[in-house]
Image (spheres, rainbow, N blue to C red):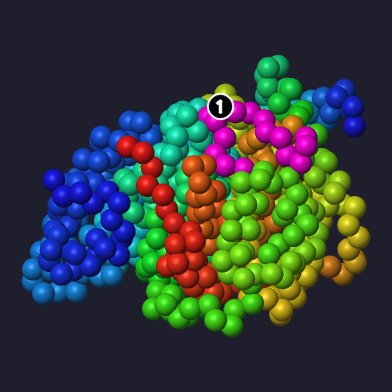
């Protein structure tokens, strides 16, 4: 994902969430978002069966 | 004045119990030492002197009356400032929480330690909202490593590491979501216990990532870790994660040795990227334990990635309202990570939680064949305060998010770990993780105690 695409994600996402981002915060936010999406890509690349239960278990 | 600076908790409790040292003298000496040395260490954010003196007087009176004073009688301790202390706002390293009303009650673990005779002396510095491995804090200043004041303590339990290593208190409590007990234990050269997820109550502590949050002790001896851990065990209806499990005391088991235990060394991911000091420390411990089996933790890198995703998204959800209304009041290093975390799609987090269960099941199979696994605690010794990057596996990486590469894959599935300190030559200390199966803190503590009793691992006293 390019920096321009990441910036668009930041603009839309923070607007939707009601977070006002100052211009001098953007570079750090972009770097963290890029790194996190990279980690997520690693997670998503692992095939899990549809039946796989997530770790947290709620008991009524 | 009595010098209690580097006495262990067990030594203090023994002296207080037998009347050769008054708890009031212990507290006077402790408060005096904090006043003298904490300006340089910056471990404490609040000192509860009046409360501590009153509590000490109660302990001394009880002993003189022939009453039982507890296994931690007169032992000073302090807690990371995300743990409730009645009468103080629980700031969690933030500016924002200073506006919170004072806590009405002490956290469960504070109550339990004091029930065992220990005496709370204050609240400790930490990385803001626990999203930190460095020990730096924009509001309270960085905690300083007692072994070299220009270096980081590690975080986020920064004051917990600095205060124990600096001889201000023998026991401190910290929290560990991705490594925040084990990292400062490693950088400050002390022992740290991250118990099994759900073992110790978190009630009365400010959360970070409920899926991954643990509380636990840091200390200068394994016996002290065990004494504190034993005093804090037990179910708690106020923490839904805390299990309804019988108390399993370990202090009396420490001397039972390690004969028959199968100990392996983590390889692959856990030997990649580490500085020579980290690998030398690991090999030093492995040789002493005759641990020759190499073991690969499957998908450890992916586990770390999944922990990262869950942490940033769940942490952002916790702080969303504060990000909306008071973003400028955050520590900038924390704020920008949390805003990025708020933008992570829920589907990624859900997949990470599914992977978490898969990974747990795979790792538990390893414990059919071994009782403990050794791994580095940190990839390097304490970096300089202010350092922003370091070289990891040949690549320059941001320091703050990456110090926990070896701790995250372990806390991700809640395994108990004792971090033990290694000091080789004149180099700074560095920690090694002793990792065991869920609920087997006893095994990790027995191995740590064996290493300590043979002088393989020890807490080096820092320069004055």
For the N terminus of chain B, the quadrant is top left
Q: At 43% from the left edge and 32% from the top edge, which residue is drawn?
A: B149
Please indicate, yes or no, whether residue B79 appears anywhere in the rendered image. Answer: no
Residue farthest toward the top in the current orientation of the protein: A23
Q: Residue at x 71, y 35 (%)?
A: B391
Image coordinates for residue B128, horizontal then vertical, percent: 52, 37
In the rendering, at what x and y percent does residue B435 appear? 61, 65
Q: Quadrant of the C terminus of chain B?
A: top left
Q: Is B393 one of the magenta-colored residues?
A: yes
Question: On the image, which quarter does residue B358 sit in?
Answer: bottom right
Q: Residue at x 12, y 66 (%)?
A: B19
Q: Chain of mark 1?
A: B
Q: Element type at marker 1?
A: loop
User: Observer-nearest residue: B202 or B369?
Assistant: B369
Q: Nearer the viewer, residue B377 or B283?
A: B283
Q: Residues within 10 Å of mark 1 (few under 14, many from 20)?
A: few
- Residue behind mark 1: B386
B343 displayed left or right of B132: right
Whether residue B235 sits left or right of residue B177 in the image: it is left
Q: Main secondary structure of the magenta part?
A: loop
Which residue of the protein is positioned furthest toward the bottom in this rendering? B260
Q: Which corner quadrant of the image does residue B265 belong to?
A: bottom right
Q: Residue furthest front?
A: B425
Asked if one can make out residue B48 in the rendered structure from this viewpoint, the answer is yes
Q: Residue at x 68, y 17 (%)?
A: A24
Residue stretch rendered in magenta on the structure:
B379-395
Where is residue B303? Give x, y as percent.
Answer: 75, 56
Q: Which of the pair B63/A23 is nearer the observer?
A: B63
**Near-viewer residue (B207 or B387):** B387
Q: Is residue B387 above or below residue B156?
A: above
């Amino acid at each position: 994902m390019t920096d321009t695409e990441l910036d668009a994600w930041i603009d839309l996402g923070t607007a939707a969430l009601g977070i006002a981002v100052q211009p001098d915060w953007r570079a750090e936010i972009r770097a963290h978002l890029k790194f996190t999406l990279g980690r997520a890509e690693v997670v998503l690349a692992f095939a899990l069966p549809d039946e796989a239960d997530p770790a947290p278990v709620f008991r009524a | 004045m009595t010098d209690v600076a580097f006495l262990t908790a067990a030594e203090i409790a023994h002296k207080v119990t037998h009347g050769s040292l008054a708890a009031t003298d212990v507290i006077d000496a402790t408060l005096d030492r904090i006043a003298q040395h904490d300006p340089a260490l910056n471990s404490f954010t609040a000192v509860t002197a009046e409360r501590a003196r009153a509590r000490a007087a109660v302990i001394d009176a009880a002993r003189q009356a022939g009453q039982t004073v507890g296994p931690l009688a007169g032992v000073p301790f302090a807690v990371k400032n995300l743990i409730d202390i009645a009468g103080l706002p629980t700031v969690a390293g933030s500016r924002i929480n200073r506006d919170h009303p004072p806590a009405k009650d002490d956290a469960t673990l504070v109550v339990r330690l004091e029930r065992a005779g220990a005496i709370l002396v204050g609240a400790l510095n930490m990385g803001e909202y626990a999203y930190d491995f460095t020990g730096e804090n924009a509001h309270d200043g960085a905690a300083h490593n007692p072994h070299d004041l220009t270096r980081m303590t590690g975080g986020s339990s920064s004051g917990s590491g600095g205060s124990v290593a600096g001889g201000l208190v023998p026991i401190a409590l910290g929290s560990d979501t991705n490594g925040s007990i084990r990292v400062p234990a490693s950088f400050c050269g002390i022992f740290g216990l991250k118990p099994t997820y759900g073992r110790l109550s978190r009630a009365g502590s400010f959360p970070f990532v409920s899926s991954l949050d643990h509380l636990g002790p840091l200390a200068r001896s394994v016996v002290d870790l065990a004494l504190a851990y034993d005093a804090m065990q037990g179910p708690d209806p106020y923490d839904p994660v805390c299990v309804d499990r019988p108390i399993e005391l370990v202090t009396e088991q420490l001397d039972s040795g390690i004969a028959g235990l199968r100990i392996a060394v983590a390889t692959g991911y856990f030997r990649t990227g580490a500085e020579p000091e980290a690998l030398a420390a690991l090999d030093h411990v492995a040789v002493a334990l005759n641990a020759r089996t190499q073991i690969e933790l499957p998908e450890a890198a992916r586990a770390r990635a999944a922990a990262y995703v869950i942490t940033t998204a769940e942490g952002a959800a916790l702080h969303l309202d504060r990000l909306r209304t008071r973003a400028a009041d955050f520590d900038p290093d924390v704020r920008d990570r949390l805003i990025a975390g708020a933008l992570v799609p829920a589907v990624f987090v859900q997949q990470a939680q599914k992977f978490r269960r898969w990974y747990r099941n795979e790792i538990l199979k390893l414990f059919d064949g071994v009782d403990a696994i050794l791994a580095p605690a940190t990839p390097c010794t304490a970096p300089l305060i202010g350092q922003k990057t370091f070289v990891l596996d040949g690549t320059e990486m941001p320091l703050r998010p990456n110090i926990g590469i070896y701790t995250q894959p372990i806390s991700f599935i809640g395994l108990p770990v004792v971090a033990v300190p290694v000091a080789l030559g004149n180099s700074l200390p560095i920690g090694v993780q002793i990792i065991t199966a869920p609920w087997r803190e006893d095994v990790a503590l027995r191995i740590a105690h064996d290493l300590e009793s043979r002088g393989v691992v020890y807490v080096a006293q820092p320069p004055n």
